Image (cartoon, rainbow, N blue to C red):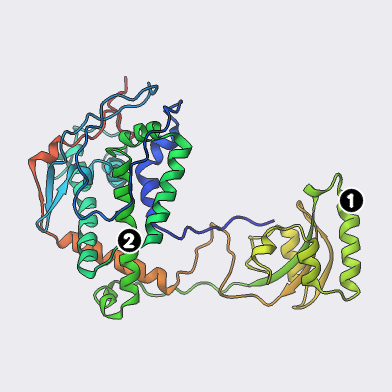
Amino acid sequence: MMKSNARKKHFWILGLLMAIALTLMTGCVTESAGNGNDDYTSTPQETPAAAADIGNTAPDAENVTVPPPFEEDFVVARVNGIDVYVSDVSFLVMQAEMALMWEYFEMFDDFNIDREREFRDGLTFDEVLRQEMVEIAAFTKIFEDMARQLGITLSNDDIEMIDDHVDMLVEQHGRDELENLLRTDGFRDLQHLVDYFNSQMILENLVQAIMDDPAEFARFEQHLPEEEEMPEEELLGAKHILANFDNFDDPNEAYIFASELLTRVNAGEDFATLMAEYGQDPGMVMSPDGYTFVSGVMVPEFEEATRDLAIGETSGLVRSQFGYHIILRTEPNENDVMRPQWMPQPRTLEDRMIEAIIMGLREMVEEADIEILPAMDDVYLGSDSWMSNDDEE
């Protein structure tokens, strides 16, 4: 009846999507190699994970390019004197390339990257790419250092959430296959991914702690965006009893079912009780007080019928592609408005505070003392980069 408008509550998951979406979505490994020992553990990491030989082959994965192993987790840069290890940057290739993509296109009118072409300040694309990777890693080092200073750690719930998510990935792909996929994106192994999740959850906890402490947020208040003036919009509120076509052998049966319920509504029976007992829209279970929506969310028949009602008034039978509706117009709830995905969403104060903190942390990166060591040249960038024209004929 409506378009989905779900919102992710934990932004750390976006890091996973950025880091491993490419290989997981292309499905380049076709067979699971089976589950290994689940010896990862989601614990806060004060120092880089121990080095490991990740191997250089992927069984049953002819289309996977697996990076060569790094025998030790060597230092490739320093941020304000804090060491940046190869494990801190090895999985950032795709994210860094995406950050540079439009700049390259604006310069050369071409999305096929020539990696040896002079790109910026006399440097090749790969040289600039490595700088970008260090700057992304610097953002992590800076917020991790701030979190340590403020005593921000992972809660037991955080650890359980991360472990559950990793368990889901292992169950979906098999441990060996998942680690093959992770290695193609620069993760050393499954524990390396867990370390990354830990860091992203620390960022979320840090941001929340800063928002909760006015003295801490004062450091970032200068970056707080002004509240946008949203265009005026008509808010409609409604709850309904639905006879869903999917639950009947033919539409006429749905009509008879809905007609009997309408008779009972018109006779004065309690709408909410009938909706709870006979309604066939699962969404009403989660929203028993009704939906609040703007134009474009509901199917046109539902929206038009709601608009024609006075608050507290019920409709006759309204047919849509989903079935027959009996609609009760309700007072809209301004704090829980459903909007189309394409419509600009008003940002709450919390949204703007999060943006201010992230902008402040990025400014700290710009002001940081970043030293890129020669060892950064040894970081593997991938022989089949997704934006490279290296293998064009």
Residue 166 seen: yes
Is the C terminus in the top left, top right, bottom left or bottom right quadrant?
top left
In the drawing, does residue 243 fall left or right of residue 256?
left
Q: Residue furthest top?
A: 393
Instruction: Give the labeled residue for mark 2.
Output: 154
Residue at (13%, 44%) from the top-left corner? 76
State how far apart marks 2 and 1 are (Cα).
55 Å
In the drawing, does residue 94 fall left or right of residue 125?
right
Q: Secondary structure at mark 1?
A: helix
The residue nearer to you, when weighing 143 against 116, is: 143
Residue at (24%, 51%) from the top-left corner? 136
Q: Splitting the image into 4 quarters, where does residue 338 fall?
A: bottom right
Relative image position of residue 148 (x, y in whole percent): 21, 64
Q: Amino acid at mark 1?
A: Glu
Relative image position of residue 286 (x, y in whole percent): 64, 64
Instruction: Give the labeled residue for mark 1.
Output: 253
